[in-house]
Amino acid sequence: MASVFSSSFLCPLKTTKLRIKLQTLQSSQKPFLINSLQLRELDPKIPQPVQTFWKWLCDEGVVSIKTTVKPGIVAEGLGLVAKRDISKGETVLGVPKRFWINTDAVAESEIGNVCTGLEPWISLALFLLREKWKDDSKWKYYMAVLPESTDSTIYWSEEELSEIQGTQLLSTTLSVKEYVQNEFQKVEEQVILGNKQLFPFPITLDDFFWVFGILRSRAFSRGGIQNLMLVPFADLANHSVKVTTEDHIHEIGGPAGLFSWDLLFSFQSPLKLKAGDQFLIQYGLNKSNADMAIGYGFIEPNSARDAFTLTLKISKTDEFYGDKLDIAESNGLGETADFDIKLGQSLPPSLFPYLRLAALGGTDNFLLESISGNAVWNLLELPVSRANEELICKVVRDSCRSALSGYHTTIEEDEKLMKEGNLSSRLQIAVGVRAGEKKVLQQLHDIFRERELELDELEYYQERRLKDLDLLGEPK
């Protein structure tokens, strides 16, 4: 579910004694009756832990008469379905702040002091692992509905990872796994081993990968990684390509139970729904299929998600390295720059200027000596010289050919596999991502091949300069 720390819980259980007292109040009779009816509306096929979790949400006042969605069996497995017709933009649920699991919740817990200074996701990870271990955890009903794993590539076996040989997805997956392992080793030495009274149970690397995957796939990030949080009930919402906006999450003030008012994490429906339709959200419009595979364990068939990141660099051995770096930095880039190339979409606007800057050499270097930085960048938006333009075409085409040679299948072979179907969920991800990357690389290669064929027809800096000075001697 959710948009994560890049793309989508709880509060103390009331005692039986307190619940009985509330039920004796005349004003509380109707709300509890409503919750009882809502509970019976759940599909009996829904697993018992989810039924118990739903009852807990009802008892705690998270679910009210205004809540228009409930857990249901959907194509993805479990999701949220509309209890009645829902208008586009209508609020469907609101989860009180006291039910959010964020760094505030960690700070107020028994491990708050030892988590000071840790990365937000690591403090949340330790909190979740501790609550999962505790039999009397306030969050036990929520912990019981969290999945043991997903199809995220961080959980794949060596054999499964071999299916994405040569892809950027594989290199990113391995980098993420190395990062998680390194962070685990550090937090184990600095926090866990020295605080056995707080962590009297074994925490393994597998446990750490599990909780990392939970946060990666289910946490919401409002205003950056520092505001990472899990929001129970809300995180049951699934993703859909049909949702073309991310503006469906809001934090508003509202009733949070029988007698309280709180900040609510609310969802507004991005689509018009009929009763029984699944409530869906958007996990992130700018995420590639590789991002989706690592974060959530699925990809979209939508080719707009197919992407490849082209990494360019200004060589430190370049005679004009300092000047080039200053120009790049003044335009929001650096010594190294990443450009996301997407299938069927225009190239990033700053790609050509950066390429020309990095390749600038020979007699073209006079631009760096005689023209100010910002003016140089403006000039680089158009071809500088034939030699410079030919070089960038060659460099990009060679890079594409080199990358394509690293895959163990062709685009045609992958398309045949997808057409035949009967692929496991993980193999479907592998084939989809590797085919998408290759298509993007082939597209990029072809763009620069066509550019090479046009070199004699392009207008370069010196010609433009002479024309501006009216020195070309063209008849008027």
Image (cartoon, rainbow, N blue to C red):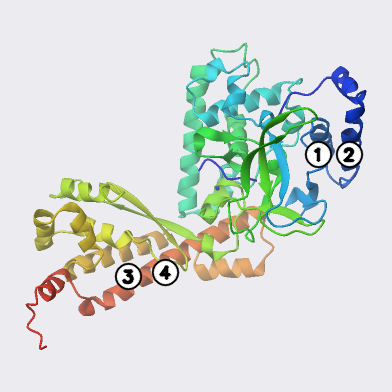
Tag 2 residue? 34
What amino acid is at disc 1? Ser
Quarter of the image where one finds residue 11: top right
Please give the label number shown on residue 142.
none
Q: Is residue 383 visible?
A: yes
What amino acid is at disc 4? Gln
Query: Image quadrant for the C terminus?
Result: bottom left
Height in image: 432 above or below 386?
A: above
What amino acid is at disc 3? Phe
Please give the label number shown on residue 64.
1
Q: How crowded is mark 4: few (under 14 residues within 10 Å), some or many (20 or more)?
A: some
Quote the CA–CA distance across marks 3 and 4: 9 Å
What amino acid is at disc 2? Ile
Q: Are the residues flagged by discs 1 and 3 in contact, CB closer than 8 Å?
A: no
Q: Residue at image x 50%, y 43%? A: 6
Q: Residue at image x 47%, y 55%? A: 167
Q: Between label 1 and label 4, give the one nearer the viewer.
A: 1
Quote the CA–CA distance across marks 1 and 3: 58 Å
Residue 210 spot, x, y in % from top left: 62, 35
Quarter of the image where one finds residue 61: top right
Quote the CA–CA distance across marks 3 and 2: 64 Å
Q: Residue at image x 62%, y 66%? A: 418
Tag 4 residue? 443
